[in-house]
Image: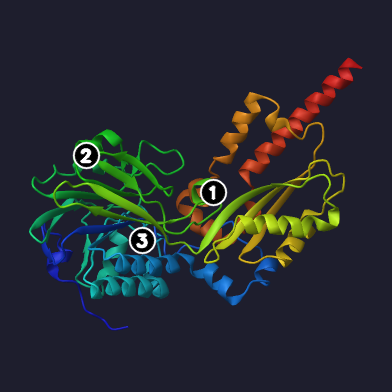
């Protein structure tokens, strides 16, 4: 890999305003965040299942975040993007990322590909990659890359066919950024399209660490045309006028509900006069976590369970560019057979195509089977359980999580929170019901 030398001092010193000339007639931006390029997919498959995977599937599991990076570049080029905005967490490991040559090379080559296609890149770093850990990595990055300062928000000005575009952003000083960075953003630049880039927790989302806390009112008050946010992995439009959006992460990293959805980036086009925004979501993931619930009819023979279930899964995993990691929940609906769930899982996987069942849980239809549909309270609880986010090792163990995660097998020690709560509720209900019956007798 050729060394292009250090970045020009004008970029490293982060001037308050940099004028960049882009020869296009319309502003088209690609907004992505939370790439976590060196992350390892969690809640994945066990060693026995790994042996049954093809080389292509193993590569997808190993390189999923890097494959998403390639897809981002392809989308940027095909959509004739002028600017790529990265709203934090390019890397995952706070410590040691500088020694990960494979990831560094992939990202540098990605930036050079964008540079070769005259695409400008603006990066606001987040809690996983604060500026102090990244500065040494930026030396070979091409001149199209602009890394926002951590001291205070900066403004870079682009001129596109005489139309002014002002891009404001700021990076984290450390991996536990406590400042309300949103408050520090400057007022909008008049007669210019204004875009903000920030890694932040808007509204104190309890499923994510409350770094760079902000509220929607502060962001809206800036009056920017587009605010590109990162940190929350679930894609969501917080506001349309002005436009404030989380693009979500580019590759799911676990089976948490917020991760179990198509992942990708947002391409937005801003009109030069009306500043009307048209945006489109593009998927970039190659591995997708999916929960599937299947009810096995009472007239289905036990011997046909595996083929029937495999066919039902195939109906929900029809995108063959994606490798699905399936958590399967089966309602046996009146069958009295004792099911060996491990064996049934293996039989289903023998008939699989672009999916693998990583977990299978079967329940029988007893008097207490339909607890969660027997009363409004249980229905509400059931819906809440489906959306609950299981805490990550990082959230449980803080700064020591990397050391701890290297010592334990997360797929066997991390219980499925939803499943455990359901079992506890069902067991408690059954025990109380039996006590009531005994008392009446």
Q: What element carries label 3?
A: loop
Graded by Cα atoms within 10 Å as few (under 14), some (14 to 19) or many (20 or more), the crowding at tag 1 reads many
Name the image quarter holding residue 335.
Answer: top right
Residue 158 in the image: state x and y as whole percent: 13, 59
Left or right of 119 on screen, residue 417: right
Q: Is residue 408 visible?
A: no
Graded by Cα atoms within 10 Å as few (under 14), some (14 to 19) or many (20 or more), the crowding at tag 3 reads many
Residue 114 in the image: state x and y as whole percent: 27, 71
Q: Distance between the residues labelled 1 and 2?
A: 31 Å
Circles 3 and 2: CB atoms closer than 8 Å: no
Q: Is mark 1 on a helix, strand or loop?
A: loop
Screen quadrant of the C terminus = top right
- N-terminal of the pair, mark 1 or mark 2, is 2
Q: In this view, does 242 lie above or below 153?
A: above
Q: What element carries label 2?
A: helix
Circles 1 and 3: CB atoms closer than 8 Å: no
Q: Name the residue under label 1.
A: 256
- N-terminal of the pair, mark 3 or mark 2, is 3
Mark on residue 90? 3
Residue 351 in the image: state x and y as whole percent: 72, 66
Q: How far apart are marks 3 and 2 (CA)?
A: 24 Å
Q: Distance between the residues labelled 1 and 3?
A: 20 Å
Using the image as rendered, state which of residue 29 and residue 148 is in the foreground. 29
- N-terminal of the pair, mark 1 or mark 3, is 3
Tell me which residue sits at (8%, 45%) in the image: 190
Residue 328 in the image: state x and y as whole percent: 67, 51
Q: Tag count in the figure?
A: 3
Q: Name the residue under label 2.
A: 183
């Amino acid at each position: 890999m050729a060394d292009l030398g250090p970045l020009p001092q004008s970029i490293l010193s982060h001037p308050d305003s940099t004028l960049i000339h882009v020869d296009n007639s319309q502003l088209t931006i690609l907004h992505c965040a939370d790439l976590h390029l060196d992350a390892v997919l969690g809640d994945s498959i066990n060693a026995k299942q790994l042996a049954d995977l093809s080389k292509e599937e193993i590569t997808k599991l190993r390189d999923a975040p890097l494959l998403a990076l390639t897809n981002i570049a392809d989308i940027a080029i095909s959509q004739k993007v002028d600017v790529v905005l990265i709203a934090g967490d390019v890397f995952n490991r706070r410590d040691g990322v500088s020694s990960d040559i494979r990831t560094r090379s992939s990202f540098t080559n990605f930036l050079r590909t964008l540079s070769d296609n005259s695409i400008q890149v603006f990066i606001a770093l987040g809690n996983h990659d604060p500026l102090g850990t990244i500065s040494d990595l930026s030396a070979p990055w091409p001149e199209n890359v602009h890394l926002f300062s951590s001291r205070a928000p900066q403004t870079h000005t682009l001129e596109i066919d005489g139309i002014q575009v002002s891009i404001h952003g700021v990076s984290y000083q450390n991996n536990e950024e406590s400042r309300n960075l949103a408050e520090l953003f400057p007022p909008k630049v008049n007669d210019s399209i204004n875009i903000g880039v920030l890694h932040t927790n808007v509204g104190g989302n309890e499923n994510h660490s409350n770094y760079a806390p902000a509220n929607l009112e502060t962001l809206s008050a800036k009056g920017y045309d587009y605010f590109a946010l990162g940190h929350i992995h679930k894609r969501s439009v917080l506001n349309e006028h002005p436009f404030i959006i989380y693009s979500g992460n580019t590759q799911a990293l676990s089976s948490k509900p917020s991760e179990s959805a198509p992942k990708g980036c947002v391409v937005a086009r801003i009109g030069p006069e009306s500043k009307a925004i048209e945006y489109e979501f593009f998927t970039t993931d190659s591995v997708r976590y999916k929960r599937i619930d299947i009810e096995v009819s009472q007239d289905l023979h036990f011997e046909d369970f595996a083929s029937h279930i495999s066919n039902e899964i195939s109906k929900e995993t029809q995108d063959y560019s994606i490798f699905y990691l399936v958590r399967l929940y089966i309602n046996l609906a009146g069958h009295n057979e004792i099911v060996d769930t491990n064996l049934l899982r293996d039989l289903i996987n023998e008939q699989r195509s672009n999916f693998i069942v990583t977990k299978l849980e079967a329940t029988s239809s007893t008097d207490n089977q339909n607890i969660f549909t027997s009363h409004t309270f249980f229905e509400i609880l059931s819906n809440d359980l489906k959306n609950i986010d299981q805490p990550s090792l990082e959230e449980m163990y803080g700064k020591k999580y990397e050391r701890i995660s290297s010592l334990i097998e997360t797929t066997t020690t991390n219980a499925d929170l939803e499943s455990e709560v359901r079992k506890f509720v069902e067991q408690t209900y059954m025990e109380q019901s039996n006590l009531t019956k005994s008392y009446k007798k």
